[in-house]
């Protein structure tokens, strides 16, 4: 191959994982160039500039966009390459790295992850879309989203402890939410702790909330955790890491092509990023993303 067919863009979030993004880039970049790839080495000053850079590279016809960072960086890359045919590569350098988990991309070895980019093997998967925005993992639209909102307002402490404190704070006052769902034209009204819409099976660093979701089946997995006591919610949380929460009597699961989720006062999160206030309509876009993996 010649010209643009051998040119890739490497887009890094240098602050991802407390600086791990920059270190991962510095390890992966020589491997990519030694393999004969022409690499545009890019980083944005903020997410808006990074997305502009990514979209410009896709418009220029680069062979692949490779993102170096966590699921937030993958989310940004997805906005640029969805439905374009430009391939997405991933050098994991975040905290959760759920998309990397989906494809068994090495999460602690950026050189090994770069080798997958060089090898060029691909897999085509679906994406979820609401309006003009896409997500690859899970949209959280309940208690978990409220915790994210509180944590984002907090300036102390940093890291996971901020989310732990936000969880404790919200748990004291949280009440089940009244949801209205449209599941492929069927209306469902109920109170629930949370609703999650999954393109993939996990979010938040391996929380398998939408256990059983398949990346290329043309369907979204909608999980409802119906009303339960706060102690029961706390006991159920660890089961998310193994996917065994599916046996809880308050768990409900639907597979749909399109879902509308409505509940008062909720701002949803997807791929770990603030996604938008409810109500939102989410549809599955089959075959929208090609991943180097």
Image (spheres, grey):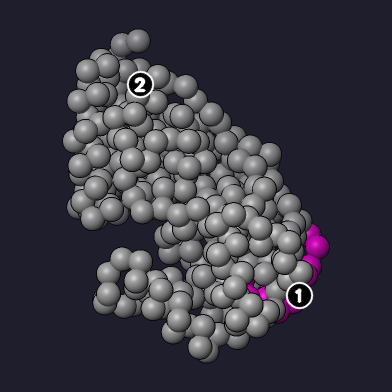
Residue at the extreme right: 186
Mark 1 Cα-neighbour bin, 10 Å: few <14, some 14–19, many ≥20: few
Circle 2 packing at 10 Å, graded few (<14), some (14-19), many (20+), is: some
Please give the name of the residue rendered at 27% of the width and 75% of the height, measured from the top-left corner: 157
Is residue 272 positioned above or below 180 on the image? above
Q: CA distance from mark 1 to mark 2?
A: 49 Å
Residue 41: image quadrant is top left
- The x and y percentages for residue 38 are 24, 21
Residue 258 in view in this figure: yes
Does the segment drawn in magenta span residue 189? Answer: yes
Ranked by sequence position, the earlier of labels 1 and 2 is 2
Work out which quarter of the rendered image holds the N terminus and state it.
top left
Q: Residue furthest top?
A: 1
Q: Position of residue 153 (x, y in %)?
A: 34, 77
Q: Nearer the viewer, mark 1 or mark 2?
A: 2
Q: Which mark is residue 140?
A: none
> In the drawing, does residue 276 fall left or right of residue 161?
right
On the image, the x and y values in percent for residue 109 come to 32, 35
What span is in magenta? Answer: 185-194
Task: Assign the magenta stretch its main secondary structure.
Answer: strand
The answer to whether 19 appears left or right of 286 in the picture is left
Question: Is disc 1 placed on a helix, strand or loop?
Answer: strand
Nearer the observer, 17 or 130: 17
**Residue identified by numbered label 1:** 189
Residue visible at 43% across and 35% down? Answer: 105
Q: Nearer the viewer, residue 233 or 274?
A: 233
Residue 5 lies, in percent from the top left, at 35, 17
The label shown at residue 118 is 2
């Amino acid at each position: 191959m010649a010209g643009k067919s051998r040119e890739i863009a490497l887009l890094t979030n240098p602050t991802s994982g407390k600086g791990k993004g920059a270190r991962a880039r510095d390890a992966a970049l020589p491997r990519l160039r030694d393999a004969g790839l022409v690499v545009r080495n890019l980083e944005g000053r903020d997410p808006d500039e990074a997305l502009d850079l990514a979209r410009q590279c896709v418009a220029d016809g680069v062979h692949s966009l490779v993102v170096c960072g966590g699921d937030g960086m993958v989310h940004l890359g997805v906005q640029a390459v969805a439905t374009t045919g430009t391939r997405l590569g991933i050098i994991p350098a975040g905290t959760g790295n759920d998309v990397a988990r989906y494809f068994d991309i090495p999460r602690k070895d950026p050189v090994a992850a770069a080798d997958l980019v060089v090898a060029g093997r691909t897999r085509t998967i679906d994406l979820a879309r609401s309006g003009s925005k896409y997500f690859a993992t899970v949209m959280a639209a309940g208690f978990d989203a409220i915790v994210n909102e509180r944590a984002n307002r907090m300036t102390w402490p940093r890291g996971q402890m901020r989310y732990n404190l936000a969880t404790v704070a919200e748990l004291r006052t949280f009440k089940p939410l009244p949801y209205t769902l449209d599941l492929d034209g069927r209306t469902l009204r109920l109170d629930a702790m949370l609703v999650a819409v999954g393109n993939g099976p996990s979010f938040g660093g391996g929380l398998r909330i939408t256990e059983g979701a398949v990346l290329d089946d043309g369907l979204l997995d909608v999980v409802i955790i119906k009303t339960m006591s706060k102690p029961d919610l706390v006991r159920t949380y660890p089961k998310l890491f193994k996917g065994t929460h599916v046996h809880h009597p308050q768990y409900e699961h639907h597979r749909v092509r399109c879902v509308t989720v409505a509940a008062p006062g909720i701002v949803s999160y997807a791929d770990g990023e603030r996604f938008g206030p409810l109500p939102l309509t989410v549809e599955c876009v089959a075959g929208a993303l090609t991943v180097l993996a």
